[in-house]
Image: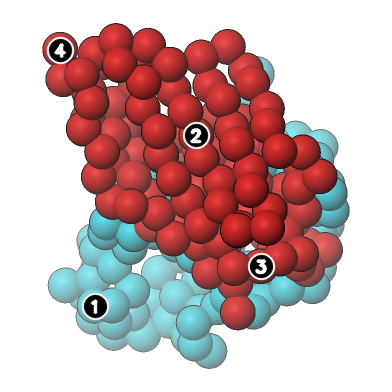
């Protein structure tokens, strides 16, 4: 079945880079996503990557996709305290409904 | 512009009672999704609507859960005879269409607590 795994916690210093990793099982995934969830706020789409790409850059965010290993990562450059949140990796499953399969989330703690 | 709204924001109920959760999607979005987020967990897919039809109900955990959508707009998720394990945040999302990449916009969720 479809499954997405993430490490649960990451702590970095302000100004450092953060790398959040994710693995997934569905080799027919078409799109992979990174969402951000802040306390008291809804889920916010940060970025996504189509499965035929291996990298996507958007300002401070870099997404790397290794389709062979089914590994996705999100790099945040120059991490700020405002980046502290829970980050969810999600894949669009093999059905054509657009439903998303989420990982359990990585809590990013940014220390000043 | 208005985003996805959900009501109530919080619901506390007693075990065995029925609850109804409401979602108002973004106007014009034909696809609507319900997800459940248990404490400390990721989101679990429950059901997908395209228009008023639900072609994918595969995530509904039991027959106590049902959902409907009317007017290609508002959706209601109903949980009958609630159990303590139903306690979670229930999130609704809508998108312009269901297939391919269409950004899903999430509502703030309804936090359900079953005592």
Task: Verify CB contact (< 8 Å) between mark 3 and mark 1.
Answer: no
Please give the name of the residue rendered at 36% of the width and 20% of the height, measured from the top-left corner.
Answer: A17
Give the label on residue B84, or none: 1
Please give the name of the residue rendered at 44% of the width and 22% of the height, measured from the top-left corner.
Answer: A76
The quadrant the N terminus of chain B occupies is: top right
Spatial CA distance of label 4 from label 1 is 39 Å
Q: Which residue is mark 3?
A: A26
- Apparent side of residue B50 relative to residue A69 in the rendered image (left or right): right
Front residue of A66 and B42: A66
**Crowding at mark 2 (Cα within 10 Å: few <14, some 14-19, many 20+):** many
- Apparent side of residue B89 relative to residue A57 in the rendered image (left or right): left
- Apparent side of residue B17 relative to residue B25 in the rendered image (left or right): left
Q: Quadrant of residue A68?
A: bottom right
Q: Which residue is mark 4?
A: A112
Camera-near label (4 vs 1) is 4
Q: Earlier in the sequence, mark 2 or mark 4?
A: 2
**Crowding at mark 3 (Cα within 10 Å: few <14, some 14-19, many 20+):** some
- Badge 2 sits on which subunit? A
Q: Quadrant of residue A29?
A: bottom right
Spatial CA distance of label 2 from label 4 is 21 Å
Q: Position of residue A18 (x, y in %)?
A: 36, 27
Q: Position of residue B30 (x, y in %)?
A: 81, 48
Q: Give the secondary structure at mark 4.
A: loop
């Amino acid at each position: 079945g479809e499954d997405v795994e993430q490490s649960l916690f990451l702590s970095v210093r302000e100004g450092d880079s953060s790398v959040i990793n994710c693995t997934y099982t569905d080799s027919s995934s078409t799109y992979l996503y990174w969402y951000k969830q802040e306390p008291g706020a809804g889920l916010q789409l940060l970025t996504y990557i189509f499965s035929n790409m291996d990298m996507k850059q958007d300002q401070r965010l870099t997404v790397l996709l290794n389709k062979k290993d089914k590994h996705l990562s999100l790099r945040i450059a120059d991490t700020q305290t405002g980046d502290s949140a829970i980050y969810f990796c999600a894949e669009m499953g093999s059905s054509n409904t657009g439903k998303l399969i989420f990982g359990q989330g990585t809590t990013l703690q940014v220390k000043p | 512009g208005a985003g996805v709204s959900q009501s109530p924001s919080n619901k506390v109920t007693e075990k065995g009672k029925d609850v109804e959760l409401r979602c108002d999607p973004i106007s014009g979005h034909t696809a609507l999704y319900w997800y459940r987020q248990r404490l400390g967990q990721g989101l679990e897919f429950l059901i997908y609507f395209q228009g008023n039809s639900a072609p994918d109900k595969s995530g509904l955990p039991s027959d106590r859960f049902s959902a409907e959508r009317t007017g290609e707009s508002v959706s209601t998720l109903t949980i009958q005879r609630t159990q303590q394990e139903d306690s979670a945040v229930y999130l609704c999302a809508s998108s312009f269409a269901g297939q391919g990449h269409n950004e899903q916009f999430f509502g703030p969720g309804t936090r359900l607590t079953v005592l």
